[in-house]
Image (spheres, coloured by chain):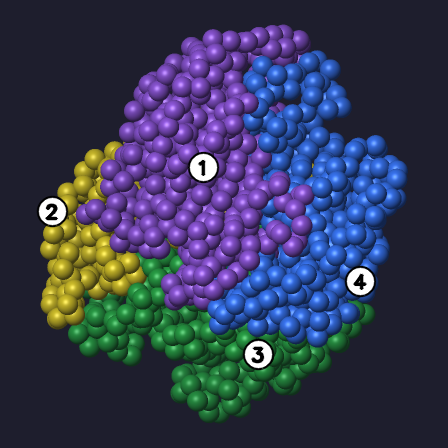
Chain colours: A yellow, B green, C blue, D purple
Amino acid sequence: MSGNTFGTLFCVTNFGESHGPAIGCVIDGCPPGLALSEADIQPELDRRRPGSSAFVTQRKEPDQVQILSGVYQGQTTGTPIALLIPNTDPRSKDYGDIVQTFRPGHADYSYWRKYGLRDPRGGGRSSARLTAPTVAAGAVAKKWLQQQYGIGFKGCLTALGALEIPFEGWEHVERNPFFAPVSDVAELEQYLLDLRKRGDSCGARLRVLAHGVPAGLGQPIYDKLDADIAYAMMGLNAVKGVEIGAGFACVADLGSTHGDALTPEGFVGNKAGGVLGGISSGQDIEVALAIKPTSSILLPRPSIDLHGQATEVITKGRHDPCVGLRAVPIAEALLALVLMDHALRQRAQCGDVRLEQAPIAAVAPG
Amino acid sequence: MSGNTFGTLFCVTNFGESHGPAIGCVIDGCPPGLALSEADIQPELDRRRPGSSAFVTQRKEPDQVQILSGVYQGQTTGTPIALLIPNTDPRSKDYGDIVQTFRPGHADYSYWRKYGLRDPRGGGRSSARLTAPTVAAGAVAKKWLQQQYGIGFKGCLTALGALEIPFEGWEHVERNPFFAPVSDVAELEQYLLDLRKRGDSCGARLRVLAHGVPAGLGQPIYDKLDADIAYAMMGLNAVKGVEIGAGFACVADLGSTHGDALTPEGFVGNKAGGVLGGISSGQDIEVALAIKPTSSILLPRPSIDLHGQATEVITKGRHDPCVGLRAVPIAEALLALVLMDHALRQRAQCGDVRLEQAPIAAVAPG
Amino acid sequence: MSGNTFGTLFCVTNFGESHGPAIGCVIDGCPPGLALSEADIQPELDRRRPGSSAFVTQRKEPDQVQILSGVYQGQTTGTPIALLIPNTDPRSKDYGDIVQTFRPGHADYSYWRKYGLRDPRGGGRSSARLTAPTVAAGAVAKKWLQQQYGIGFKGCLTALGALEIPFEGWEHVERNPFFAPVSDVAELEQYLLDLRKRGDSCGARLRVLAHGVPAGLGQPIYDKLDADIAYAMMGLNAVKGVEIGAGFACVADLGSTHGDALTPEGFVGNKAGGVLGGISSGQDIEVALAIKPTSSILLPRPSIDLHGQATEVITKGRHDPCVGLRAVPIAEALLALVLMDHALRQRAQCGDVRLEQAPIAAVAPG
Amino acid sequence: MSGNTFGTLFCVTNFGESHGPAIGCVIDGCPPGLALSEADIQPELDRRRPGSSAFVTQRKEPDQVQILSGVYQGQTTGTPIALLIPNTDPRSKDYGDIVQTFRPGHADYSYWRKYGLRDPRGGGRSSARLTAPTVAAGAVAKKWLQQQYGIGFKGCLTALGALEIPFEGWEHVERNPFFAPVSDVAELEQYLLDLRKRGDSCGARLRVLAHGVPAGLGQPIYDKLDADIAYAMMGLNAVKGVEIGAGFACVADLGSTHGDALTPEGFVGNKAGGVLGGISSGQDIEVALAIKPTSSILLPRPSIDLHGQATEVITKGRHDPCVGLRAVPIAEALLALVLMDHALRQRAQCGDVRLEQAPIAAVAPG
């Protein structure tokens, strides 16, 4: 009920606060027999980690994950996998100023209204730090999906604030700190340096995809694959918009040009983004996200205090000028969690065989 | 697991196919003591009904709802409310041609891949007709939310294919068959007549909002209010994009201008769309949807048959040239179902009192 | 939340009241491709039906089931199966007297306290009539389990009030109206006739079992197979006790004699009742139930009215002198629903293969 | 799906193995504002702790609980409460002998069949040690239920193997290591010493009750209060039977004597065990449990090995001669978790007010 568990069959229960002793999650529903160790999870956490470049928060967190249960002799046992990530660098003093006030655009206010109290240390539970356990769980899902079905994941930055980023190639993405699919990131660096100098923040747009997805994943009529993807992505901190395939561009399109034609060689085009009627078609799953500028900035903003009186807020401390820069691994993890859950649901209802059957038509690149 | 139940506390289980004997739903979790009869539900179904204008499918369905249970002497009893809507005009012959082929952009193909069989009569389970039970359940949620908290719902068309529709006023919306917020719809009519003449279809963009929503609804960190709204909306047939508040426009925005300032008189602006950190802030909930052109068109499209052989598909029968025209009542219903569920969740965890407490600051119009 | 859905993967949502227009259920999660028609379900409903002998309620209900959805050309499609059972003989006048009072031992009082109102017609939602949809759903589960794994179900009466019933053989069970495993039921008939003459009712004890159950069903540590069986059985109207295998007799047993020895030929004995550590072992699942005497009797009982004043209650109308007499088909159905759900859960987590693997040791009859 | 979460609104996700680095749980759904620290939880863990007397396992585990999240400045925040209990005395060598064999009556065999592998160290996931997190979570539920509604819990041993234990008074229960309601436990001590000398184990019967429970808890028709209690109790390791109120004694009872009469002063008797039609009546909730003899004994038993070959098994190591001796705190905790969940469910559906309304009749002691 309280919304801290992701998934119905592959269930990830997330816990912790930004400045508590530890964060983590419990994965319930992982199939037995998957080879798993911390070394499978750590690289994904490292991709998301704070302090990894000059352009993200300088909080020093190794984000070292420990497996507390569910693995015996290097294999998952089918029982819950508890993952623990200790917090090592919580500087609570940075947040002293904001206890009595609400940052515009921040969860400060709504948490206070919901619960009647809040943990203000680093945003408490609303901190983007809580995406780390999601990434850790996603790493487990990614490994299983890769081994079982050959499913892979990719993501990149497609816009940084007002800068549109052209797509030059996937090979560039992991070679710069922005997950940008371009060879030269000088312009992006300059944009962020200017932003930081002004004490401001900016938004971002991301693309994330899954390839090798078997047809048949997704449950109509409510738990459609795209519905669950939208849920996952909109739930990522700061996301304000989600698109599947053509997204908002479909509005001005016509039926005669929109639907991806089927041919004996596969689909022509991928405006559907890999989902038809809420069920995967065998094409790549294509998702786009809009991420708003972080609300924790050094510039003064008008606001109110706990007593409803007018005041001004400046957020000191260590913040990302663009939270979108670290969002690619998180969005990939969320997509993996959705697919993992639906793979198990499909297996429950329709059995292994259907998932593994040969498609009636090979699927061409979108 | 199979995805036909919406909600966790206010649960709507949807059943039926487009051309079966009946469609309907079971609502489990409605509070007792709500005055309820068919007359509370029928008007919402009438707003969505086929055959209501020259611009939507000419299938004649009265969509007459029957309450089978859960109401005694005009009041809900707290037990399941079963709603039945008989199908009266299923012309299965219209669909004979498509049994052996797959419509590009349609669920035909993915259902077949998922289940190994499909009911092709009118799209079977994938038909937009299955939104009728959702609308019926939404009417119950709307009534309870109105009585308990004064929450209201509105929606309108903001683009029809390539035509952007300016916002002239809410008073126009129910006076034309397009839910368009304009006084003169001649241009929209002409656009649709041209489209129909060509046998084609087009997309649409919608706006839907809820006002009077108390602060505190939504459950971090996964079942955020906006996450569940995105799930609901992306699950609506043909939707390819969802935005909350500023949506994709936030990408090019700056932190210094994006966050809605708080003042003693209320928020200034509503770029957040009424949701901060996944929890309602007391502002209007603002949602936008992109709806793709329907894939059932009279123009021939290249496709394949059940054996993977190339063929051509033309969809005869009675189809909407723009499914977005009937989507406003559905999107409102979905938003109502999400808020209903979260109102009960909030009541469970934090009690009645918090929901009803006075806000620390009056909320100004966004 | 409101407790009208049974199961997590094979979900049965039950609706209706004893004297409303209809009762029924929606099954969500049935695998596609199961041959299914009303003829598969009706025989199980007939076993439970009222009016079937002189010893049960004389209400005349044909309990004719209709499949409203989820089946196309004689096969399940994987989409929700809605089952409708119209009420044809609701004599509401029989219940006029009890609207203002509470029957001792009946749900009248607790429903009133819970909801603040209640539907008194025939017990409304609390009527044992609502077990009919459970039996209908159980019939679908039984058919699938039989076809997929060869699982079968049996049940019998082991005590009628103070009369212990010896076990003579399963072949007798369906040949008398008591589900008694004995050739001669004269003593049982006389016992019930005496009871009816006095206007009284009595309790019963039942045994129900499943054979052919593969090892591996059940989910530690909370959703154990026996835990879910206990939930199912204790939820059956009037049940006050549940035993698995040896049951309460295990209290006085010793470790050296209790555990069923494993031999290369199979288990020796079945004190475990087919469940070890919450997981099926491959032995028969053995369950026993205690059913209390119905509270609707012709003898006067001291009670209170809606205003808390002392009064006396006599229940007129058509009631079963022993509700246990019709409980065998219901208990079988509940056991089938539990096994169905756990079979799908096992299939999701561990795949088809494990369920179908050869056991390491053949399992001897318990 | 995988069954490691207890509850629907107050959700306890349990993780860990007997000999892993730690065990614990995550509580999701605890209302905010409850004063909570480790000191509220530790006493309940101490009541269940191993090594606490000569009559239970001599494993030395302090079972020191740490709160990792969800509490800020001594109050619950409404976010997940993660509880960690490190394992400090796991002697894996004790279990070396059993890796290749299956103990009769133990989960060894069924886990192996289910998952295809198992963690044999101390029973791994099937160990009764995993009840510790349940007890910890139960302590949180107990505190909230006490503060919110004045609900309290009690439990005692009513039979130790073949020894029936008379009820002398609740005041004795916490003064002896057996939770026995008698002043003199010499006979019990002697019984256990004899048992231990023989290397054998025995069963037990327990009684557990909740008092001060408001009327109206429980959700018909499947998630009845007694159904969920039966689920909870049958899921406790080694339990083979559950009774509510009169339990199996109801079989030989008559309708005229069974139902608890209602009077203006309250109920007369409590054969119902506090539950009518699945909903609490305001009387004490009365539950009885049968616990089987532990299967880990020093006496040799015939069994099979992993290859299906006949062998003999002796379990060395530190085991309880009667697991029922430590079960009272666990059963109380489980009952608290069920009531907590249903209190929140009732609050969600019917609001605070109903739970707190004055009863129509004072409820007399049962």
Query: Disc 2 marks which residue?
Result: A93
Q: Position of residue D148 (x, y in %)?
A: 33, 55
**Separation of disc 4 and disc 2 at Cα?**
76 Å
Residue type at numbered disc 3: Gly
Give the secondary structure at mark 3: loop
Residue at the spot 52% in from the left edge and 38% down from the top edge: D288
Residue closest to the eye, A14 or C150? C150
Query: Disc 1 marks which residue?
Result: D331
Residue at the spot 81% in from the left edge and 70% down from the top edge: B93
Query: Disc 4 marks which residue?
Result: C58
Q: Position of residue C166 (x, y in %)?
A: 79, 33
Q: Please say if B33 is above or below D195.
A: below
Residue C72 is at least partly visible in this image: no
Q: Please say if C254 is above or below A225.
A: above
**Separation of disc 2 and disc 3 at Cα?**
58 Å
The answer for which chain carries disc 2 is A
Q: Which mark is residue A352?
A: none
Residue type at numbered disc 4: Gln
Residue at the spot 66% in from the left edge and 16% down from the top edge: C262
Q: How many marks?
A: 4
The answer for which chain carries disc 4 is C
Q: Which mark is residue B74?
A: 3
User: Foreground mark, 4 or 1?
Assistant: 4
